Image (cartoon, rainbow, N blue to C red):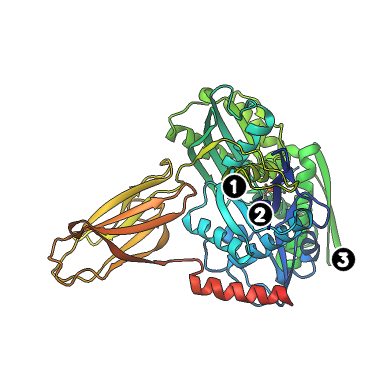
């Protein structure tokens, strides 16, 4: 049986895009069954069946309680932020329904598909990465790998814009800043491209900042004006009103990327308002949001010990980077011209398809049955959060976060920490693993409780137990224990603080399969 074509999926907060490599090794975006290049990451749940994409968006105003959107923001949490159809769903399940639709649509063009590279924001922490892989598994996809969105974008730009030569190597060393402002997340990454090596040198961002925040600002402005006009009657009082406000705001926002002013018309329960708004006013009411991105970039440059003058290129990715205020701010800050040569919507999926091509062997046929031209690149990432263990200071009783792997360490990386047993015959050691947070572990993300068990019953007090933490190239964590005095591995298990465990994953897998089979 011929191997299936691998696809690259940009699983976005608001929109998702799928690409594959054609017979010449060129990335192409796949149109969905509605004929569009991008698919809204929105799910309408109706009992056990679901509708994903444009049709779900259409229904959002009428049936807001059945709509799941922005689920990507909740990845890594136990549950999606609101009940859908009366049920609390894990965000992985919502994402898997989106992935399943993308896979199905791609199959119309390419035949059966089972392998994919899925992109994640560089700033995604480990539980969010795991959740993404789990969602793909639920959708029946074998994940070749997950790759950071800015890295994918840099690959696509490199290959398509022409700062790489025919051999796929950078003509000169490039130090680029990838500014990725999507629908719900903001990512900024500094990358070096030398020859065919793509190396992320530092990454930062905000998983709670994206186009939706600009929409909300404008929606609030419309609602305030509406309330002033209609004696305190607030359209934000019901869910359908909020959905329609957001829709109007998003439309106006997009228009303001092309025009200096628009007039918004909004109607609610028989009352209406016409509201002219200029781009300058919109920029003023959202200036603090843009400032947050400027602040993140400045901190990142400082951390990487780079000046703006060290950069050779600015790449803009993500639909929200179309807002003229973004380009203006970046060009003002850097003195460089923004590179706008690739569609910000497609770059990430194209990079993912190129990366999928890299991961597959040369002899894997493409859609046209010929071997794909294998991009000869090497991709290196950095960790996006500190990895630490939380312990109690015996003297003060306070929590202490000991950082084992600092953020922005080149991946893959393995670091060990040495523990000693406290008493004779101690059976186990428990370690609390966290990501991020301050010196006391405040504002950190708990990864889980790691237990080293079945220590030998005659183990003397003070025996050494070593724990090794490995971040793979894709930011996924593996923990191993060793008993060096006995020259053997220790039995170790992790009880994860969030996400789906194997049992739950199987349970949901069965349930989703049953839903599909109907
Ligand atoms: P992404 O997740 O990268 O697809 O980005 C989607 C976000 O980009 C949404 O918040 C859109 O409202 C926003 N967006 C798309 N096109 C434009 C535009 N022309 N002007 C402003 N925002 C846009």
Visible in this render: residue 292?
no
Q: Element type at marker 1?
A: loop
- Mark in front: 1 vs 3: 1
Q: Which mark is residue 3?
A: 2
Q: Earlier in the sequence, mark 2 or mark 3?
A: 2
Q: How many marks?
A: 3
Residue 215's spot in the image, x, y percent?
70, 51
The answer to which of 405 and 253 lies nearer the viewer is 405
Q: Which mark is residue 64?
A: none
Q: Are marks 2 and 3 in contact (CB under 8 Å)?
A: no
Above or below — where is 146 with respect to 140?
Answer: above
Q: Residues within 10 Å of mark 2 (few under 14, many from 20)?
A: some
Q: Earlier in the sequence, mark 1 or mark 2?
A: 2
Residue 432's spot in the image, x, y percent?
34, 62
Q: Are marks 1 and 2 in contact (CB under 8 Å)?
A: yes
The C terminus, quarter of image: bottom right
Please give the residue where the numbered disc 3 appears in the rendered image: 270
Quadrant of the rendered image containing residue 195: top right
Please give the residue where the numbered disc 1 appears in the rendered image: 360
């Amino acid at each position: 049986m011929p191997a299936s074509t691998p696809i690259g999926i940009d699983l976005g907060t608001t929109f998702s895009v799928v690409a594959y490599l054609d017979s010449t090794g060129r990335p192409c975006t796949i149109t969905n069954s509605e004929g569009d290049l991008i698919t809204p990451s929105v799910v309408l749940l109706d009992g056990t069946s679901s509708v994903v994409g444009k049709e779900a968006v259409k229904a959002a105003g009428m049936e807001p309680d059945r709509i799941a959107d922005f689920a990507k923001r909740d990845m890594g949490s136990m549950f999606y932020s609101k009940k859908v159809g009366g049920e609390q769903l894990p965000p992985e399940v919502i994402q898997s329904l989106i992935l399943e639709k993308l896979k199905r649509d791609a199959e119309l063009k390419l035949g059966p598909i089972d392998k994919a590279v899925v992109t994640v924001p560089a700033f995604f922490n480990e539980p969010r990465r795991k959740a993404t892989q789990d969602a793909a598994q639920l959708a029946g996809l074998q994940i070749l790998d997950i790759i950071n969105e800015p890295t994918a974008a840099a690959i696509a730009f490199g290959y398509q814009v022409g700062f790489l030569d025919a051999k796929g190597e950078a003509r000169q060393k490039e130090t680029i800043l990838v500014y990725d402002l999507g629908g719900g997340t903001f990512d900024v990454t500094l990358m070096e491209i030398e020859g065919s090596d793509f190396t992320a040198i530092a990454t930062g961002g905000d998983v709670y900042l994206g186009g939706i925040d600009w929409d909300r600002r404008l929606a609030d402005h419309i609602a305030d004006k509406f309330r002033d006009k209609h004696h305190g009657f607030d359209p934000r009082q019901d869910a359908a009103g909020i959905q329609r406000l957001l829709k109007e705001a998003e439309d106006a926002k997009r228009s303001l990327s092309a025009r200096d002013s628009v007039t918004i018309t909004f109607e609610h329960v028989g009352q209406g308002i016409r509201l002219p708004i200029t781009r300058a006013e919109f920029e003023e009411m959202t200036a603090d949001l843009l400032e947050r991105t400027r602040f993140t970039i400045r901190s990142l440059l400082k951390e990487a010990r780079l000046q703006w003058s060290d950069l050779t290129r600015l790449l803009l990715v993500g639909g929200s980077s179309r807002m003229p205020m973004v380009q203006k701010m970046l060009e003002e800050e850097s003195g460089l011209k923004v590179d706008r040569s690739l569609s910000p919507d497609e770059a990430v999926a194209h990079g993912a398809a190129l990366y999928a091509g890299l991961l597959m062997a040369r002899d894997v046929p493409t859609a046209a049955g010929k071997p794909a031209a294998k991009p000869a690149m090497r991709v290196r990432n950095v960790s996006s959060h500190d990895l630490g263990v939380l312990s109690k200071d015996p003297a003060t009783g306070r929590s202490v976060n000991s950082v084992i792997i600092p953020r922005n360490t080149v991946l893959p990386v393995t670091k060990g920490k040495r523990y000693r047993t406290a008493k004779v015959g101690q059976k186990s050691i428990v370690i609390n693993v966290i990501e991020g947070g301050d010196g006391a572990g405040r504002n950190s993300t708990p990864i889980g409780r790691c237990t080293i068990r079945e220590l030998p019953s005659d183990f003397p007090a003070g025996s050494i137990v070593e724990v090794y933490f490995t971040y793979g190239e894709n930011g996924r964590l593996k923990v191993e224990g060793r008993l060096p005095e006995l020259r053997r591995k220790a039995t170790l298990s992790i009880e994860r603080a969030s996400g789906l465990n194997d049992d739950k994953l199987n349970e949901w897998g069965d349930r989703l399969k049953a839903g599909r089979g109907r």
